[in-house]
Structures are given as C-alpha cells and as structure tokens.
Amino acid sequence: MSSTNIQTYIDRAVQLEAEIAAAKEQLEEAKIRIQTELYAKMQNCNLNYAYASSDNGRAELMIRTKLNIIDPEKAMALIGAVAEENIKVKTEPKYEIKTKFKIALTALLRMDYEEIDLKAILALLKAKPDAVEVLVKKLKGEYKKDLELLRAAGLGSENLEEELDAIRAAKNAELVKKYFDLSSLDVEELAKAISVEDTLALTISPGEQ
C-alpha cells in the first residue's frame, strides 16, 4: 500500500471518528429530550411507563427497580417459609431471587399493586366478550408484551399507558396475594431489611412495534 493510500485512509478514519463522536453527542441529546418528555408524561399521569411513536420508530420509558436484601435474617423471619423457597444465598453474599417472587416483593414494598378487574379494563377497550377470557389469561403484567397483545387483538387506537399500568398493578396484586399473608406481615419492618431502588430505562426501537 502506498503512502498516499495510507494518508487517504487516515484522513477517512479521522473524519469517521469525528462523525461518530458527533453522532453520539446528538444521540444522547435526543435521548435526554425523549426521556424528559416521557418522564413528564409519567409524572403527570402517575404512571410507571410511557411510550411515543414516530414514522420511523418508537420510544419507551419505564421505571425499573433494584431490590437488595440488607438484613437477610430479619427479612427471612418476617416473610417466613416462602422466602426460603424463593431466595437462595450465594457466596459474597448475593441473593438469587426467583423472578415472580421478586416482582411480588418489589410490588409489596413499593405498594405498587391494586386489585383491579382485568375484564373491566378489556371491556372499556371494547374487547369482544368471547375474546376477554383468552386475553385475561394471556396478560403478563409486562408493558411491552401486553401492549403487543392488545394491539394484536385490535384494542385501543390511542396510547394505552394507563390501561397497561392498571394491568401491571392487577397482575402484581395477584402475585402479592399468592406469596404473602398481608394480615400478619409487618411490611414497614420488612422495608427496613430490604431496599428497593428505582431507575429509569429508555428503549428506542426502529419501526412500529
């Protein structure tokens, strides 16, 4: 390869590096603006999830929670036998918590659950009576999966954040009821043994999902 070709490629590489750096900066600026708008929407509507679409893609913002066991002995004593079945102690120590139990425990500590009639929500979305039973069984309490299910069923032409949040709260309530005896569990004391931290997670996807 001649020195002239090397110089050409060096110049091209420098140019590309500058373009990539500029694109990264512009992307971060775009993400901040998107996140700011969606977070304001979440706060105004008291939601944990919001999304918006454009001609070329969509953006989703949701609150993700990190659960950490601070006082394992206290937590185990308060929760009881169900904790032993769903929480494994790993060396360091770390705790491996089964997914559904973790969702239930997080919802319990954040008071992020509510007994809501899922059939009533589907009825408001004008679901056909013969489809309601099937849809109720398929709803997961996961924003994206539930949105895809509702869209596939032809429900809701507008944004469905409020309905999706209500579905998630209802599914959380089912798990809380499954794992915990709220009449005897001291949730305030449990919160002193287990911490829950919220973070924002922004997802950008090409095309309409």
Image (cartoon, rainbow, N blue to C red):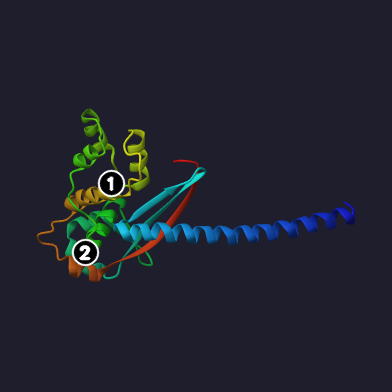
Q: Which mark is residue 163?
A: 1
Question: Which badge, 2 or 1, is on the more N-terminal residue?
Answer: 2
Q: Which mark is residue 76?
A: 2
Q: Quadrant of residue 95?
A: bottom left
Q: What x and y, as percent, mark residue 154?
A: 33, 33
Q: What x and y, as percent, mark residue 9?
A: 80, 54
Task: Determine the CA span between mark 2 and mark 1.
Answer: 35 Å
Marks 2 & 1, CB-CB < 8 Å contact = no
Task: Residue type at mark 1: give it.
Answer: Glu
| Camera-nearest residue between 143 and 108 | 143
| Camera-nearest residue between 37 and 61 | 37
Task: Residue type at mark 2: give it.
Answer: Met
Q: Quadrant of residue 120?
A: top left
As displayed, is residue 165 above or below residue 21? above
Callout count? 2
At mark 1, the secondary structure is: helix
| Camera-nearest residue between 5 and 124 | 124
Residue at 33% x, 45% y is: 160
